[in-house]
Amino acid sequence: MHAHKLLNVLLIAILLLATLLSDPLARPMRAAPGSLKTPTITLDISLAPTANSHTWTTDADFAGGALDHTEVVSGAGRVTLAHTWSPDVKVNDDVLSSHQADPSLVVSGNNPYAAWEDSRSGNPDIYFARSTDGGATWSANVKINDDAGSADQRNPSLAADESGGLYVVWSDRRNGNYDIYFARSTDGGNTWSANVKVNSGADSLDQRTPSLAVDGSGGLYVAWNDGFYGSAALSADIYFAQSTDGGATWSAQVRLDDDTNSAFQYSPSLAVDGGGNLYAAWDDRRNDESDIYFTRSSDGGATWSANVKVNDDAGSADQYTPSLTADGAGSLNLAWVDYWDGDRDVYFARSTDGGNTWSASARVNDDAGSASQSAPSLAVDGGG
Ligand SMILES: [Ca+2]
Ligand SMILES: [Ca+2]
Ligand SMILES: [Ca+2]
Ligand SMILES: [Ca+2]
C-alpha cells in the first residue's frame, strides 16, 4: 500500500515547552530560570531508525509568537526536512504582546495544526490555527473554549483523525477548580463544538495535563493527572476515560497507575496503535524521585497492565514529562526530560514488544553544554 513509504516522512515532533512561562502551577517540581524559549524538537525515525541517530529541531520561540531557529540534527549530520517549521513564522495572529504558550502540534499529511494557551483576552484561553502550506503561513486564530467568564484554560492536547476530524482536550477552571474539557471540529478547525467535560471524579480536586489519542475508527481516549491540588495534594494519580460517540459522552474513569502508596503521578502521555492497543506513560515519584512509568491496555482501556519503569538509570536523577507514540508497525517510542547528568536533557527509549521491555535510555539532544531542554511532546504521522 505504501509504494513510496521511504518518501513518507515519519515525523515525531517534540515540543519543548517553557513550563514556567506557560503555567507556573502546572509544573511545581522544578524551576527553569532564564528559560525564555519554548524550543521545538522534531525527530524523524524514518531517517533515523536506531536509538543512536535522531533527527530533531530545536529552539522554537513560540512564547514570543514565532517558531524559529529550526535546526535538524541526526546521527548522519544535519538534515533539513521539507515540512519542518520555517524561520520566523508566527502562528498566533494577535497584535498585542499577550502571552502564548504551551503549544500542542499535530501533523496531518504535510500540514501542521496547532492549539495553544493564549492570554490575549486577559486570561488563559485555548486557541487554534492551521497551516495548509506546510507551516509557511497560518490561518486566523480560533478560540475553542466556550465559557463566558475569565477562568483559566491551559494544557491543550490536540489530535487529528485520518478523515479530517480535529479534537482537543485541555484543563479548565470554569467550575472553580480544574476539570478536563473536550471539543471537536469537523470543518478543519473553523468552528468547534460545545465544550464537554471529560472527567467524572471528585470535582473538588484538580484534573490537569490531559493527553488525547484518537484511533482509526472514531475512538477517543484521554489520560490526565487527577487530584494534585486537592486535599490529596501529594498523591495525584493518572486517570483515563474514553468516548465512542465522538466525544459527546465519556466513560467512567479508570486509574492507570498501580502505585500502592500515596506517591505523585503526573503528566501522562497516551497513544493508541492501529490494532486498538492503548499505551500510557507518565512521570512517577513512587521511588521518592521521578521516573517514567508505562502501562498498556489490550482491551480498549477496560484493564491495564502492571506498570513498568522505562528509564534505566540506577541513580536518583529525575525523569519527567514523557511523550509517547505508537507507530503502525508495533513499535513504541518514548521521549522524556531527564536530569541524569545534572542538567535537563531529552532522552529517548524504544520498545518493539508492546512495552514489556525498553531499549537503553539514549540522550537525544547533543548540546555539550548545560542548556536545559524540557517537556517533549511526540506525534507520529499516519505513515508511521
Ligand atoms: Ca479563559
Ligand atoms: Ca475538578
Ligand atoms: Ca498517586
Ligand atoms: Ca529517576
Image (spheres, helix red, strand yellow):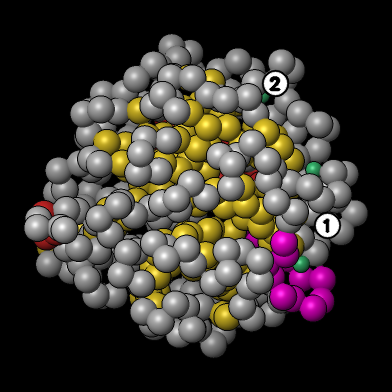
What kind of residue is marked 2?
A: Asp
Q: Quadrant of the C terminus?
A: bottom left
Does residue 259 belong to the magenta stretch?
A: yes
Report the residue marked by disc 1: 233
* Disc 2 and disc 1 in contact, CB within 8 angstroms: no
Is residue 260 or residue 200 the one in the foreground?
Answer: 200
Q: Label 1: few (<14), some or many (≥20) within 10 Å?
A: some
Q: Residue at x 31, y 23 (%)?
A: 138
Q: Quadrant of the N terminus?
A: bottom left
Q: Is residue 250 visible?
A: yes
Is residue 379 or residue 230 the one in the foreground?
Answer: 379
Q: Residue at x 47, y 63 (%)?
A: 276
Task: Give the extent of the magenta segment.
Answer: 254-267
Q: In this rendering, which labeled residue sits more in front, label 2 or label 1?
A: 2
Q: Which mark is residue 331?
A: none
Report the residue marked by disc 2: 147
